[in-house]
Amino acid sequence: MKTLTFLARSAPYGSSKAKALLDMVLSAAVFEQKIQYIFLDDGVYQLLAGQDPSSLAAKNVSAALPALELYGVDQVFLDLASLQARGLSTDQLLIPVTTCNAADISKMLAASDMVFSL
Amino acid sequence: MKTLTFLARSAPYGSSKAKALLDMVLSAAVFEQKIQYIFLDDGVYQLLAGQDPSSLAAKNVSAALPALELYGVDQVFLDLASLQARGLSTDQLLIPVTTCNAADISKMLAASDMVFSL
Amino acid sequence: MIISLVIHGAPGTTQGAQTALTFCRAALAAGHRIYRVFFYEDGVHNANALSVWPQDEQDLNAAWASLVREHELDAVVCVASALKRGVLNADEASRYEKPAASVEPAFDISGLGQWVDACLNSDRVVSFGV
Amino acid sequence: MIISLVIHGAPGTTQGAQTALTFCRAALAAGHRIYRVFFYEDGVHNANALSVWPQDEQDLNAAWASLVREHELDAVVCVASALKRGVLNADEASRYEKPAASVEPAFDISGLGQWVDACLNSDRVVSFGV
Amino acid sequence: MSTLHIVNKSPFRSDALQRCLALVAPGDSILLIEDGVLAASLSTLADSVSGRSVTCYALIDDLAARGVSAADTCIRSVDATGFVNLIVEHRNSLSHG
Amino acid sequence: MSTLHIVNKSPFRSDALQRCLALVAPGDSILLIEDGVLAASLSTLADSVSGRSVTCYALIDDLAARGVSAADTCIRSVDATGFVNLIVEHRNSLSHG
């Protein structure tokens, strides 16, 4: 088993990056790897409740979040500084996540076999 | 005749944007429009002397610069603040250009029929 | 008013092509004339006839083709951008000995001169996906 | 050492695909084993067999195909990314009633499982063009 | 004789909005679209254009998609028809890459 | 047990280098490639990593293409073979998008 760390750092809808990383996470979960899924920088916008991309004819990226645990992705982290820098707070998020800081992320990176960032 | 303003703001080689904008400028020149070609932000790197992209198997974007005047593109400007912010000076540039500032660019924009920025 | 569009972004990868499509529909609905839609750089992928979208997503390629047909829009794909990206018509496929054409027939393939012409004949030119 | 590559960028638009090609050649020259090159998102355009490059530019599509053949590399194109971008093999072209295939035959089309498999069987996985 | 500045990039990842603000002139307008609307939720944009005779707009579908709202009433929501009207009302437009 | 941070974006247009510097740990390295090498010509990068046990590299072909050179001797030039060696020497790599 490998430890794979995923840094979700892009806002949803402006590009396909949020969806592309989520698809990688779910694929790795099917193979039962140890997954660390970390939302930081603009990636924290992926967790916001109340997203409604229907008028963009786009799929709601956040719809998959509540199912992450079913897929065995239970190590989901949020960089608190990224959230606060954007004027957001944890009660605006769609799912409960463990908050972390840059030092925590550095430690998780050091313990990872592979890292993917989108 | 229309006044077309082109804002070259991307560094060369990392993306095709510098070349894509240059191709637009040269096409507009063939149709003898009034052209304002302004290098600012990272676009100032397009003017640097000594570029050698041969090992990237890429074409030298700056090779076309000396021919601009032959194409009738004689209104070429450089945003001096962008150059200085990058630790560069005008004596490092491949062709002589007229320096300008943000207020000059705003005036040129106001007098333009169409503006393209890459 | 006479408006032209320049589209730089591929469908699906960045949002620009979708924004342009919505803008184009709104401009037509408001009674403006769309003189030309010019697809440049990665924007040429909007004219790829071979793309297959997932059933639960909007097919942006089909949406463009349908809008172009319905309003008889002048939709032009930049030839230099298109060749490099494998968007070819039958003539080019034959000339360059490629096995197939790939451009949606509702689009024309031509040069940047068509973009300059759009600048000369439009009141406004709006760029998307830069 | 066993190394895999993930390539996100289209050739010509951004530099990532070129950087990856140079890296891949250098890794092979240094005696490392390339377990797999996985093309994801816009990276699938590297496997487009229909692209026609200008004569005075390096044909990056041909360069990849040639490297893959010469070293018998396992080059895999993500099927979901490829379908949406019009990079199809004959089976898919037939299944989705498209007029032609467009993938360079040196590349396989498969799913993200091949990328996970590369993670499991490689010492290093390097991402390009993100 | 004014310009519509169109910004489609996140203010956190890209300097597009900063570069727009450096060039914007009195009478110009700024329209936030796509990831650019993330700037609408910050008070800093309203502060930056305050007193400069610059009007700010944000595309309503992009705000709704992302679940964010304008932090300040001086940033006006527009739909696609409003976007078209802004193009018509300004002499030219500048899509900041 | 260290990470090779790969940065391919201009420090002026993107916050990729800043975000890299926020995550870099002692023993990690930073490799500038593509437009990322533009940061090599600035003294600020050398200052940022000074005293942090972080080594900086820049891809020589990308420096040469752009006609820029490293501002500080602490930023080492590497060729493609050196890039491969850095990948081998570090436990993992992080390409900062």
Image (cartoon, coloured by chain):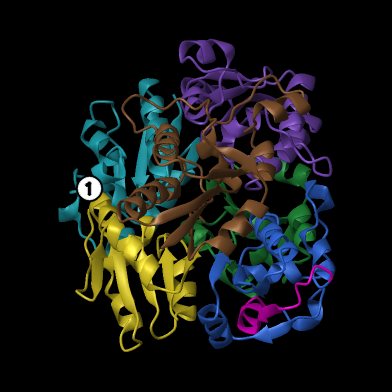
Chain colours: A cyan, B blue, C brown, D purple, E yellow, F green
Identify which amino acid the numbered label 1 is placed on.
Gln
Q: Position of residue E96 (x, y in %)?
A: 49, 65
Q: Image point 57% across, 53% down: which residue?
A: F27
Q: Quick check: is B97 in the magenta stretch? A: no
Residue D47 in sight here: yes
Query: In the rendered view of the protein, which quadrant contains the C terminus of chain D?
Result: top right
> Around disc 1, counting alpha carbons within 10 Å, would you say few (fewer than 14), some (14 to 19), or many (20 or more)?
many
What span is colored magenta in the figure? B70-87
Q: Position of residue C51 (x, y in %)?
A: 49, 27
Query: What secondary structure is marked by label 1?
Result: loop
Residue F97 in sight here: no
Q: Which residue is mark 1?
A: A51
Furthest-left residue in this view: A91
Vertical arrangement, residue D7 with respect to residue A40, above or below? above
Q: Quick check: is B76 in the magenta stretch? A: yes
Q: Image point 64% across, 28% down: which residue?
A: D48
Between F28 and D101, the residue placed more toward the observer is: D101
Q: Position of residue D3 (x, y in %)?
A: 64, 30
Q: Image point 49% across, 29% down: which residue?
A: D81
Vertical arrangement, residue B80 with respect to residue C79, above or below? below
Q: Chain of mark 1?
A: A
Between C46 and B58, the residue placed more toward the observer is: C46
Q: Position of residue B81 (x, y in %)?
A: 61, 83
